[in-house]
Image: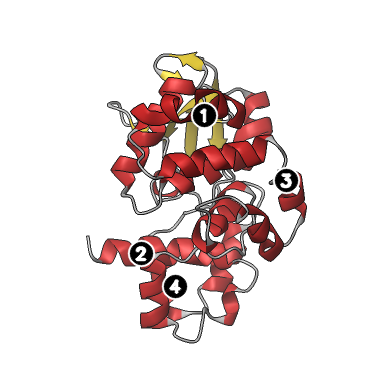
Amino acid sequence: MNKNKFYILHKNCLNFALTLDCGQAFRWSLTEDGGIHGVAFGKALTIYDKGDEALLLGADETDFNKIWKNYFDLDRDYEKICKKLSRDESLKKAISAYPGIRILRQDPWEALCSFIISQNNNIPRIKGIIDRLCTALGDDLGDGDFSFPSPERILEAGAEGLAPLRAGFRVKYILDAAEKVAGGTVDFDKIEKAPPEEGAEELKKIKGVGDKVAACALLYGFGKVDALPVDVWVKKILAELYPNGLPDCTEGVRGIAQQYLFHWRRNLEE
């Protein structure tokens, strides 16, 4: 593994363990020595949280500024956002119970493909499918790490090449997504510049992409922090706490609000 080291001082509202294990990314796992290891944007990274600072093993200053600063959304003022969200009592409880969750800014293609795979699936199985996909078709980064394969690489593999993933009905959706993204039918640049509603319609050109998958791709891949993915847990939250919709304090950051509520509500039953 790349032995570059980069230290960052912790900011308020930054907890790596919570952020990387709250259902928004699927390529991070704990190491035997207490680190958190994963791959994003073709770079492997191991994070050691040391209280007031964190060691990023595998990153130098260039990588940090080019990839990880944006990936962990470090330029956004989460302290201000959390203070605003805490005007609502339930959100205040969620943020107090799980402080430091941030919305990751993942590669748009990886986020889209990952949440297509996530449909009617559980997290261990999602991680297994994605791991098999990367091992089979991604670039070998060394030390057992692989990049996430491009749409073009997936198209080359075809249905036969994706069969070992054991992804079931999702294979045809993955292939359709790869074809439309590689061919420009779904334009990521257009989505980047568009409001969430227009971006969602662009993504829903892909077979198997409905409101929830589109919202996840927008939130976790395009940084649209007002996008609101609604899954089983969020439906429960809305029915139990917000039958008339999320409170006004979530305006503009509904995606961040739902991430706190999602993790809080899900853990109440675990």
* Number of the front mark, 4 or 1: 1
Residue at numbered disc 2: 264
Going from the N terminus, do you reach mark 4 or mark 3 first? 4
Look at the numbered disc 1 and give the secondary structure of its residue.
loop
Look at the numbered disc 4 and give the secondary structure of its residue.
helix
Name the residue nearer the viewer: 189 or 84.
Answer: 189
Residue at numbered disc 4: 92
Amino acid at dot 2: Trp
The percent coordinates of residue 261 (x first, y second) are 42, 67
Is residue 123 toward the left or the right of residue 198 in the image?
A: left
Residue at numbered disc 3: 187
Amino acid at dot 4: Lys
Going from the N terminus, do you reach mark 3 or mark 2 first? 3
Q: How far apart are marks 2 and 4 (CA)?
A: 11 Å
Q: How far apart are marks 4 and 3 (CA)?
A: 38 Å
Look at the numbered disc 3 and give the secondary structure of its residue.
loop
- For image coordinates 36% across by 81% down, the residue present is 240
The percent coordinates of residue 172 (x first, y second) are 47, 41
Q: Residue 148 carries which label?
A: 1
* Number of the front mark, 3 or 1: 3
Going from the N terminus, do you reach mark 2 or mark 4 first? 4
